[in-house]
Image (spheres, rainbow, N blue to C red):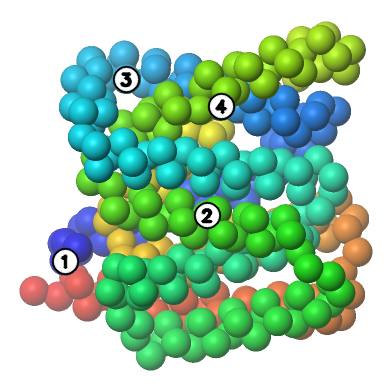
């Protein structure tokens, strides 16, 4: 990990930007709830593949991508990344389509915990005292929110587990973020096209039922997916997982506010307590990241 303060600041800004977009993108997906989640996943992968192909063409060639593909280690990591990211997407879209935004929020609360633990267990990173406090507050919040649900939150667990593993894989990849993303979409695009072909004959499919506005949104699923993923991949190469992971609390806070204020999902007092603990953890995180940035900026 580079100690370059500029890279650290870039990582923080890229990570915050990616997570803010992911929080707000719920509004985007809500415009497509008329269609099956599986079909939307297929279109999302296909449009992401097309977007990345255009980016690589603008960049001026496929040489870096082809070089990365020739590396067995990169191929293995990218294959795992592709599988985990499609599980994450599927779980999230299921949550949005079936109005379980608060469970999706819980999943994104759990994800930073997994990311931090993998950073410590696999990458050998160390926690600073403020980060121990963040972990303790997040653990308490997760316990409170899970209790308020009264059942095993499977969607939340799928979101959390898949994203934690994806974060670890992206941290270990040394190839450029856009190239690793392109390789992930190469792995997924054929199954995605097959899925679209299977579901398209239905009368309520995108091909048969989408309005002109919905077609525009379907086309935009590529950029909406690729831009924050690229930002996240670039952030993962600049920040330790113990610092990148807690930034993810931005997503569930935005999801919580949308589910409660915009989409009228019920929130009881216990859930409010859990989210309150997370907001305290966010405040501690902000102070910790600010102090770390100032330390790195000193000569």
If you read the primary sequence from the N terminus, does the residue marked by circle 2 or circle 3 appear first? Answer: 3
Label count reads: 4
Name the front one of labels 1 and 3. Answer: 3
Mark seen at residue 144: none
Which residue occupies 68% across, 47% down?
Answer: 92
Q: Contact, CB < 8 Å: mark 1 with mark 4?
A: no
The label shown at residue 3 is: 1
| Mark 4–mark 2 distance (CA, rounded to whole Å) | 17 Å
Instruction: Please provide percent x and percent y for residue 90.
Output: 66, 41
For the N terminus, give its image quadrant: bottom left
- The answer to which of marks 4 and 3 sits earlier in the sequence is 4
Percent across and percent down for residue 133 are: 49, 88
The Cα atoms of the two marked residues, 1 and 4, are separated by 35 Å
How many angstroms separate mark 2 from mark 3 (CA)?
25 Å
Residue 45 badge: 4
Work out whether 147 lies above or below 107. below
The part of the image, by quadrant, that contains residue 10 is bottom left
In the image, which is nearer the foreground, mark 2 or mark 3? 2
Q: Left or right: where does residue 279 sit relative to residue 144?
A: left
**Residue 142 picture location, percent across and down:** 67, 77
**Above or below for 236 versus 273:** above
Instruction: Tell me what residue is drawn at x 60 percent, y 44 percent.
Output: 87
Circle nearer the N terminus (4, 2) = 4
Q: Nearer the viewer, residue 157 or 235?
A: 157
Residue 179 appears left or right of 104: left
Q: Which mark is residue 56?
A: 3
Pointer 1 local density, CA inside 10 Å: few below 14, some 14–19, many at least 20:
few
Residue highlighted by disc 2: 163
Residue 185 position (above or below residue 291): above
Q: Local crowd at mark 3 within 10 Å, few (<14), some, or many (≥20)?
A: some
């Amino acid at each position: 990990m580079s100690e370059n303060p500029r890279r650290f600041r870039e990582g923080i800004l890229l990570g915050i930007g990616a997570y803010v977009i992911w929080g707000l993108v719920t509004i985007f997906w809500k415009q497509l709830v008329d269609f099956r989640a599986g079909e939307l996943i297929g279109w999302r992968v296909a449009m992401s593949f097309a977007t990345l192909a255009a980016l690589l063409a603008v960049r001026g060639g496929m040489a870096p991508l082809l070089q990365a593909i020739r590396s067995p280690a990169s191929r293995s990591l990218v294959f795992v990344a592709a599988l985990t990211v499609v599980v994450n997407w599927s779980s999230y879209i299921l949550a949005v389509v079936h109005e379980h935004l608060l469970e999706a929020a819980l999943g994104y609360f759990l994800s930073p915990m997994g990311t931090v633990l993998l950073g410590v267990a696999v990458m050998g990173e160390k926690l600073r005292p403020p980060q121990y406090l963040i972990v303790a507050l997040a653990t308490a919040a997760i316990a409170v929110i899970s209790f308020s649900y009264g059942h095993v939150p499977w969607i939340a667990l799928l979101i959390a587990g898949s994203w934690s593993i994806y974060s670890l894989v992206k941290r270990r990849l040394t190839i450029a973020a856009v190239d690793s993303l392109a390789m992930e979409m190469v792995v997924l695009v054929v199954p995605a096209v097959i899925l679209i072909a299977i579901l398209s004959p239905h009368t309520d499919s995108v091909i048969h039922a989408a309005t002109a506005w919905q077609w525009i949104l379907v086309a935009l699923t590529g950029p909406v997916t690729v831009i924050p993923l690229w930002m996240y991949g670039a952030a993962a190469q600049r920040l330790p997982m113990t610092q990148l992971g807690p930034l993810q609390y931005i997503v569930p806070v935005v999801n919580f506010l949308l589910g409660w204020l915009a989409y009228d999902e019920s929130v009881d007092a216990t859930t409010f307590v859990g989210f309150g603990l997370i907001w305290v953890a966010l405040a501690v995180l902000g102070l910790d990241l600010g102090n770390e940035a100032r330390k790195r900026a000193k000569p």
